[in-house]
Amino acid sequence: MNPREALNKTLESFDLKAIDIANATGLAESYISRYRSGKAGNIGSETLVRMIRTFPIEAQYYFWSLCMKPDTEKTTKGKNLAIATEKLETGF
Protein backbone atom coordinates (compact mmCIF):
# COMPACT_ATOMS: atom_id res chain seq x y z
CA MET A 1 0.00 0.00 0.00
CA ASN A 2 1.36 3.44 -0.78
CA PRO A 3 2.04 5.89 2.08
CA ARG A 4 -0.90 8.17 1.23
CA GLU A 5 -3.37 5.29 1.39
CA ALA A 6 -1.72 3.96 4.56
CA LEU A 7 -1.92 7.40 6.17
CA ASN A 8 -5.62 7.74 5.36
CA LYS A 9 -6.42 4.25 6.60
CA THR A 10 -4.43 4.79 9.81
CA LEU A 11 -6.10 8.12 10.56
CA GLU A 12 -9.52 6.58 10.02
CA SER A 13 -8.77 3.40 11.99
CA PHE A 14 -7.37 5.24 15.01
CA ASP A 15 -9.67 8.29 14.80
CA LEU A 16 -6.69 10.63 14.41
CA LYS A 17 -7.18 14.19 13.14
CA ALA A 18 -5.15 16.24 10.69
CA ILE A 19 -5.38 19.25 13.01
CA ASP A 20 -3.58 17.32 15.75
CA ILE A 21 -0.82 16.30 13.35
CA ALA A 22 -0.57 19.90 12.15
CA ASN A 23 -0.27 21.22 15.71
CA ALA A 24 2.38 18.65 16.62
CA THR A 25 4.51 19.09 13.48
CA GLY A 26 4.03 22.72 12.53
CA LEU A 27 2.70 21.69 9.12
CA ALA A 28 -0.40 23.44 7.83
CA GLU A 29 -3.58 21.42 8.24
CA SER A 30 -4.48 22.35 4.64
CA TYR A 31 -1.18 20.85 3.42
CA ILE A 32 -1.91 17.57 5.22
CA SER A 33 -5.42 17.54 3.75
CA ARG A 34 -4.09 18.19 0.24
CA TYR A 35 -1.58 15.36 0.64
CA ARG A 36 -4.31 13.01 1.88
CA SER A 37 -6.48 13.81 -1.13
CA GLY A 38 -3.59 13.48 -3.60
CA LYS A 39 -3.57 17.17 -4.52
CA ALA A 40 -0.22 17.95 -2.89
CA GLY A 41 1.73 15.29 -4.76
CA ASN A 42 4.39 13.35 -2.94
CA ILE A 43 5.92 14.65 0.26
CA GLY A 44 9.43 14.03 1.45
CA SER A 45 10.19 11.05 3.64
CA GLU A 46 11.32 13.33 6.48
CA THR A 47 7.95 15.11 6.47
CA LEU A 48 6.08 11.82 6.38
CA VAL A 49 8.11 10.43 9.29
CA ARG A 50 7.51 13.65 11.24
CA MET A 51 3.78 13.15 10.83
CA ILE A 52 3.84 9.44 11.71
CA ARG A 53 5.86 10.08 14.88
CA THR A 54 2.95 12.09 16.27
CA PHE A 55 0.77 8.94 16.28
CA PRO A 56 0.34 6.66 19.27
CA ILE A 57 2.81 3.76 19.01
CA GLU A 58 0.08 1.29 17.96
CA ALA A 59 -0.92 3.56 15.09
CA GLN A 60 2.71 3.92 14.03
CA TYR A 61 3.08 0.14 13.83
CA TYR A 62 -0.19 -0.12 11.95
CA PHE A 63 0.89 2.53 9.42
CA TRP A 64 4.24 0.86 8.72
CA SER A 65 2.65 -2.58 8.44
CA LEU A 66 0.26 -1.20 5.82
CA CYS A 67 3.16 0.31 3.89
CA MET A 68 4.91 -3.05 3.82
CA LYS A 69 1.92 -4.86 2.28
CA PRO A 70 2.30 -5.29 -1.48
CA ASP A 71 -0.25 -3.56 -3.64
CA THR A 72 -1.51 -6.70 -5.36
CA GLU A 73 -4.05 -4.87 -7.48
CA LYS A 74 -1.52 -2.71 -9.33
CA THR A 75 1.04 -5.23 -10.59
CA THR A 76 0.72 -8.08 -13.05
CA LYS A 77 2.48 -10.40 -10.65
CA GLY A 78 0.17 -9.21 -7.88
CA LYS A 79 -2.92 -9.73 -10.04
CA ASN A 80 -1.80 -13.25 -10.88
CA LEU A 81 -1.19 -13.94 -7.20
CA ALA A 82 -4.61 -12.58 -6.28
CA ILE A 83 -6.28 -14.75 -8.95
CA ALA A 84 -4.38 -17.85 -7.82
CA THR A 85 -5.23 -17.19 -4.18
CA GLU A 86 -8.90 -16.73 -5.02
CA LYS A 87 -8.94 -20.00 -6.99
CA LEU A 88 -7.31 -21.85 -4.12
CA GLU A 89 -9.79 -20.42 -1.62
CA THR A 90 -12.81 -21.26 -3.78
CA GLY A 91 -11.55 -24.68 -4.89
CA PHE A 92 -11.27 -23.53 -8.52
Image (spheres, helix red, strand yellow):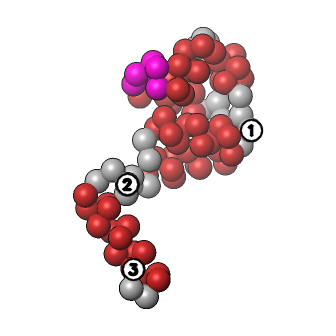
Mark linked to residue 15: 1
Amino acid type, label 2: Glu
Which numbered marker is on residue 73?
Answer: 2
Answer whether residue 7 is magenta in the image.
no
Q: Residue at x 39, y 25 (%)?
A: 42
What residue is at 59 percent from the left and 49 percent from the top? 62
User: To which quarter of the image does residue 17 belong?
Assistant: top right
What's the residue at 47%, 83% (across, down)? 90
Q: Residue drawn at (39%, 85%), measured in percent from left and top?
A: 92
Residue annotated with mark 3: 87
Question: What SS does tag 2 mark?
Answer: loop
Q: Secondary structure at mark 3?
A: helix
Q: CA distance from mark 1 to mark 3?
A: 36 Å
Report whether residue 37 is seen. Answer: yes
Of mark 1 and mark 2, the one earlier in the sequence is: 1
The amino acid sitting under disc 1 is Asp
- Is 41 positioned to the left or the right of 63 in the image? left
Residue 5 percent across, percent down from the top left? 50, 40
Residue stretch in magenta = 38-44
Q: Main secondary structure of the magenta part?
A: loop
- Give the class, few, some or many, for how many residues have Cα within 10 Å of label 3's Cα (few <14, many ≥20): few
